[in-house]
Image (tube, rainbow, N blue to C red):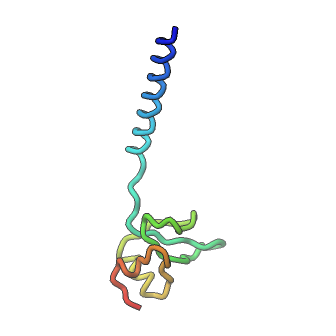
Amino acid sequence: MWLQRIDTKIDAVRRREAEQEHGRRGRPPVPEWIVELGIGAGRPPVQVHTGDCYAAGKRRRPVVRDEARRLLASGLPACTHCRPDQHLGILE
């Protein structure tokens, strides 16, 4: 009786681990650069971040390196936590 309970628990743990691994493989890759977007009509860009920045808000979109550099050069502020301007080689 105990052996059956243990086997059932082992099977459940293996299934859960397999599902978690499947979820990790199906997740899209982290973008290299992201732009945080504002609130309201048109949702203007607010700040540039690296793709893995913890301080980026929920409203964001991925951008390519050239667009991130262009946005920073046009005066859009860089995140003070991840410092994308330093990674992109833009001096103030």
Q: Nearer the viewer, residue 73 or 4?
A: 4
Residue 49 placement (x, y as % from top left):
46, 72
Query: Given the current orientation, which residue lies at the most extreme right position?
Result: 40
Residue 50 placement (x, y as % from top left):
42, 70
Residue at screen point 40% across, 39% down: 21
**Residue 36 left/right relative to 72:** right
The quarter of the displayed image where residue 29 is located: bottom left
Residue at screen point 37% across, 89% down: 91
Query: Given the current orientation, which residue lies at the most extreme top position?
Result: 1
Residue 58 placement (x, y as % from top left):
57, 63
Q: Quadrant location of the C terminus?
A: bottom left
Is 58 rendered above or below residue 38? above
Is 10 rendered above or below residue 91? above
Query: Given the current orientation, which residue lies at the most extreme left position?
Result: 89
Residue at screen point 45% across, 81% down: 71
Residue 18 placement (x, y as % from top left):
41, 33
The quarter of the displayed image where residue 41 is located: bottom right
